[in-house]
Amino acid sequence: MISIIIPVYNEAEEVISNLIQIQNRISPFGYVTEILVVDGGSNDGTLALINQFDGIKCLESKRGRSRQMNHGAKQATAEILYFLHIDSFPPQDFDRLIEESVRNGHQAGCFKMKFRSRHSWLQFISWFTKFNARFCRGGDQSLFVTKSLFEKVGGYNEEFLIYEDHEILKPIYDSSGFEVIQHSISTSARRFEDKGILKLQILFWIIYLKKWSGASSDALYSFYMKHINN
């Protein structure tokens, strides 16, 4: 059985339509036991909108995706945890695909990814997500992991307010037969479109290189806030 965990912060504009998109992709086989949306202190009415939504359990947490996802994992009741961004739409019957992967011996995995954009560069970098290499991973691809493995690796490192998705993957790759399911999850290109596609990609590469060269979580977050989330 699967618990879906979705962190949100100030998503009032699209949260309802996106949750409907996600729900419509669940198979009729009953693998999903709950959808947990974890709000990180939104001040735009996101929480009130989610509380009116049938079939969704809303939790409140301190802000920060790593904190929010850990909080959701603690409340989850299923054997498989599925961490999903609110603007990423998994493939049809994604829960069946996840269940099959775990049943075939994979304790963790994700989907390959495509952007909801026809821009050639975004299509090009999406192409790399089909490969099972850690440097090809990103949070927009989502992550499924057995609860036992998640607890074994200690969950998300809450020191990392960004880059938390990459940080958890090293122990997961070391501990499991990670699988990239060859069905596409689609994700929003809104941040690339807002910042400039090439500019944002270069900034993400700089963060990756900073982390690889030993930069602290605080240094990564400072760079992110100055150059990306400014």
Image (spheres, rainbow, N blue to C red):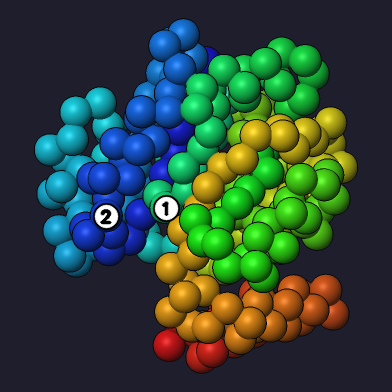
> Looking at the picture, which amino acid does disc 1 mark?
Asp
Q: Nearer the viewer, residue 65 or 158?
A: 65
Report x, y in % for residue 7. Answer: 41, 50
Q: Secondary structure at mark 2?
A: loop
Ranked by sequence position, the earlier of labels 1 and 2 is 2
Q: Say whether residue 128 is left or right of residue 230.
A: right
Check if mark 1's residue and mark 2's residue have beta carbons within 8 Å.
Answer: yes
Q: Secondary structure at mark 1?
A: loop
Report x, y in % for residue 171. Answer: 79, 46
Residue at 51% of width from left, 61% of height from top? 117
Report x, y in % for residue 109. Answer: 71, 36
How many residues crowd around disc 1 within 10 Å: few (fewer than 14), some, or many (20 or more)? many
Q: Does residue 12 appear anywhere in the picture? A: yes
**Residue 146 in the image: above or below residue 151:** above
Residue at 62% of width from left, 22% of height from top? 97
Residue holding disc 2: 14
Residue holding disc 1: 87
